[in-house]
Amino acid sequence: MKRLPIGISDFEELVKNGYYFVDTTKLIGEVYKDGSKIILLTRPRRFGKTLNLSMLSSFFDNRKKTSELFEGLDISDDVEIMKVINSYPTIFLTFKDIKDRYWDTAEMKLKNLISQLYNDFYDSVKSVLKVGIEVKIYEDIINRVAFISDFQESLKKLTEYLYRAYQKPVILIIDEYDVPIQSGWSNGYYDDVIDFMRGFLSGALKDNSFLFKGVLTGIYRVAKESIFSGLNNLSVLTIFDEDYAEYFGFTESEMEKLLNAFEENTEDRENIKRWYNGYNFGGHIVYNPWSVLNYLRFKDLMPYWINTSSNNLIQETININMKEKERFRDDIERLITGESIKKIVDDSSALRELRTKPNAVWALFLFSGYLKPETKVLKAGKYECMLKIPNEEVMIFFKDTVLEWLSVQDTDIFYDMADSLTNGDGEQFCMELKNFVMGTLSYYDIKSEPENTYHMILLGMFAHLTGGYWILSNRESGKGRYDICLKAKNKEDYSVVIEIKPKGTREDAEEGMDQIEDKMYVRDLESEGYTKILKISLAVDGKDIESVVKG
């Protein structure tokens, strides 16, 4: 049995050392035959981007002899493509580690990266460098003492030098081009990093006669920042597009082969599907490869992908919008109860639009892998999508982020309060809720729109109960719509219907209970055979809560 390639993103290392390889080598032929000179592929992190680009580099690089590595793989059947193996000067550059808090250190790492690149190719190009200025600038870049403008022009210059040396155009492969840009956005040096990357990338990609093909990957299409402006032969392939869709993440057929190879039983397969499946790339249902491989290694259902790297940008965006926008809170509420939301998604949104355009946040969540498109319809150059949380792993992230937003120091408080309800003690729940509000929440967090705020607090509180309950919000039942219902999956357990009223008086709490009974909010539960039903009316105003419980 082959070894699991957890954390192995170097193609040659993976094949030489006998790791299990999900064969994506047909990607090589598709890239080579693609009519576009520049191809940008956007996918979430840890979905195989680096490994695929390493594979492309290994195949095309004329400094290598790698034909043995591709023997028996799918690409070996393509006679036309196999004729060009190891026949192009190839530059492979990854920005995946340029994610620093300060621009000074990010700039230093960028210069170090370019310095190392120049050093790696020195023997290949030294004979074609013009004596004097070219030699000096080349050596200055290696020694990291060149002007910033020289570093920005360095990638285009290197393609020219390689063309001179080999009399053949260059294949340029760039991995995770947007990592330093996203880091700049999160840490306050966005304009600095955009200026650098614009000069560095656009110079190498735009109207470069020394370039045969450019392939870039990233999580997010950084548009409207002039990095890719003026590129007449650019193809941007996102998760919406069918082209290249099957090469990132594990498809159903690839999963079947993988699970057979590691002899997984039916129960394990169902768990893997529930936790790590659900992504939709160009119409292909895709599993999260990082989490699948880690599950096969450790046999525990854990949020492996969520826990591997920083989610700061996503969490920051959620926290800001939860505090400022009621509609956003409503949307998150629906998502964590398992519903879909309809949104317009523009794949050319810029990061700077996250704070000015409401729909930009949904593009970020979607292309970063935190939501999936159940449906999409192209309208006026943008997609109208039904968006949903893809699987249990990502659902856990959203639930935990909601709890964090509620500023709970000890989340056990929420668990205890929810347990009171599931044990049928409505009075205890109401008392614990009052104590929580008095001791934890700021008055200013709840003074405006108290009904909506308490609604969100309760949904966050109940988020962990989805294993045993359906968490229903604003659903029709009887003659009206209740606010929240905890519907037990086991009819022997307690179910709960909650109504929330404003003003915080006893009279309003009693009015809420009358509403529960007059509008027969529990009728659907009773008709399905539920007998253990708690009815709770909460009247809220700031930190004042009055309650009526029946059951």
Image (cartoon, helix red, strand yellow):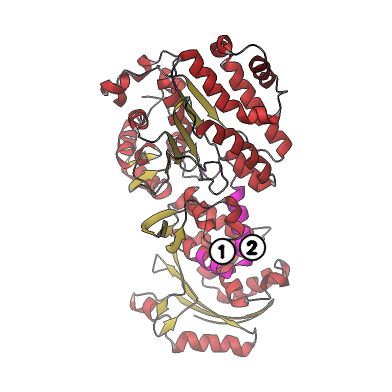
Tell me: 453 left or right of 340. right
- In which quarter of the view is residue 37 placed? top left
Compare residues 158 and 112 and report the one nearer the observer: 158
How crowded pointer 1 is (Cα within 10 Å; few <14, some 14-19, many 20+) is rated as: many
Compare residues 314 and 175 and report the one nearer the observer: 175
Q: Is residue 459 above or below residue 313?
A: below
Q: Which residue is under mark 1?
A: 460
Mark 2–mark 1 contact, CB under 8 Å? yes
User: What is the three-letter code of the residue carrying label 1?
Assistant: Gly
The magenta stretch is 304-331
Circle nearer the N terminus (2, 1): 2
Q: Is residue 310 above or below residue 37?
A: below
User: Where does residue 24 sit, x and y in percent of width and height?
Assistant: 36, 31
Q: Is residue 528 above or below residue 22?
A: below
Q: How many marks?
A: 2
**Residue 252 visible to an observer of this rendering:** yes
Compare residues 57 and 348 and report the one nearer the observer: 348
Residue at the (34%, 78%) spot, across then down: 527
Q: Which residue is under mark 2?
A: 406
- In which quarter of the view is residue 60 placed? top left
Q: Main secondary structure of the magenta part?
A: helix
Residue at the (67%, 17%) spot, across then down: 133
